[in-house]
Image: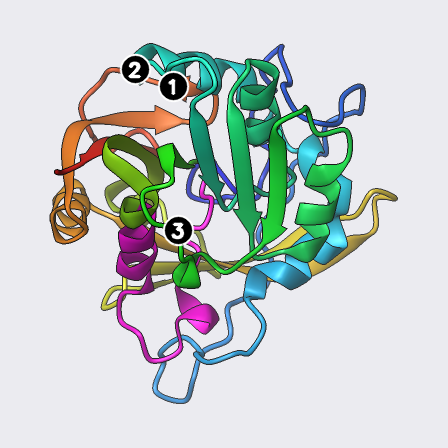
Amino acid sequence: MFGGGPDQCRVDSAPAPDTGGTITGQDDLEPLDAVGACHSGNDGRMAAGTERHWFEELADHMGPAYLRYAFTKGTRAEIDELLRRVPLRDGARVLDVGCGPGRHAHELGRRGFVVHGVDISEAFVDLAGVDAPGGVTFAAMDARTMKFDGEFDLVLSVCQGAFGLSGGPAAGRSLDPDRQILERMGRAVRPGGHVVFTAFNAYLQVANLLDGNEFDAERGVHCEVTEVRDPSGAAKEVELWTTCFTPRELRLLCELAGLSIESMTAAEPGNWTDFPPDGNFPELLVIARREG
């Protein structure tokens, strides 16, 4: 859902010329600086255990204004690169996990693929359904409890879809909820099919920790307090909790999920490079295949 550098919800860079989103012709939101500090427990650890995922409140406030952030502007370029690396047959079935307002699902649908998008935010699912291309459907769903079994040719979770957003208050007592999400994604794709996802780069995140932000080294979770805006421009202070990974951790998680990694490269929104992982790009792009 969110992509970018150490301060995920800021709009520091100029948007790419193509939008590829469901809403166009709007001015980009101005950069938003982190404010305040994350809330921690008495022992200094991040708070845990909430009934409602922290992202739902954020999505409720932003609504369609989400698509005005610069990191959403590279949709077409990302899908172009996806299809270059993972060729799909006409009419292939795609699952978009953590689809947000549906920008990747819409773009894939316009290219003739059958897409089902799932997101924990009902507000975003409702927005995604507006003007959806034929063959593109959406449902409100927690990625940790998906029941799909070999139904898709490709499972996608990019620009911080569900993978990487289940830390902090959403994790409860689980040390590694993203393993559960990746395993569900691996089960949803047919044997031999692909799972493609991005993850925040832990090396870059730790090296660029901003004042007032917090990084839980035990869980690998970064928290920042920032402001997001609704369609009218009204600001709301929110906490963003994102789990960050090293390449080694992603390889181990894929192995546990029965996935064989075909490539892992450095990435940023709208720019999926062929460079190996490093400490300069904010994201890691993983292309893996289900074994069997």
Distance in Å between CA atoms under marks 2 and 3: 24 Å
Residue 278 shown in magenta: no
- Pair 2/3: label in front: 3
Compared to residue 250, the image places residue 104 above or below, namely: above
Q: Describe residue 267's horizontal placement relative to residue 13 as left or right.
A: left
Residue 169 shown in magenta: yes
The segment highlighted magenta reads 159-185
**At which x and y percent is residue 79?**
47, 18
Mark 3 neighbour density, 10 Å: few (under 14) some (14–19) many (20 or more):
some
Residue type at numbered disc 3: Phe
Q: Which mark is residue 82?
A: 1
Q: Is label 2 in a helix, a strand or a loop?
A: helix
Give me the residue at 29% from left, 29% from top.
280
Mark 2 neighbour density, 10 Å: few (under 14) some (14–19) many (20 or more):
few
**At which x and y percent is residue 154?**
36, 31
Mark 1 neighbour density, 10 Å: few (under 14) some (14–19) many (20 or more):
some
**Hey, which residue is sitting farthest bottom in the picture?**
42
Pointer 3: what residue?
148
The answer to whether any part of residue 163 appears in the image is yes
Pointer 2: what residue?
85
Looking at the image, do the residues carrying marks 2 and 3 touch, with CB atoms under 8 Å apart?
no
Residue type at numbered disc 2: Arg
- How many dots with numbers? 3
**At which x and y percent is residue 210?**
43, 51
Give me the residue at 65% from left, 36% from top.
31
Tell which of 160 and 14 is nearer to you: 160
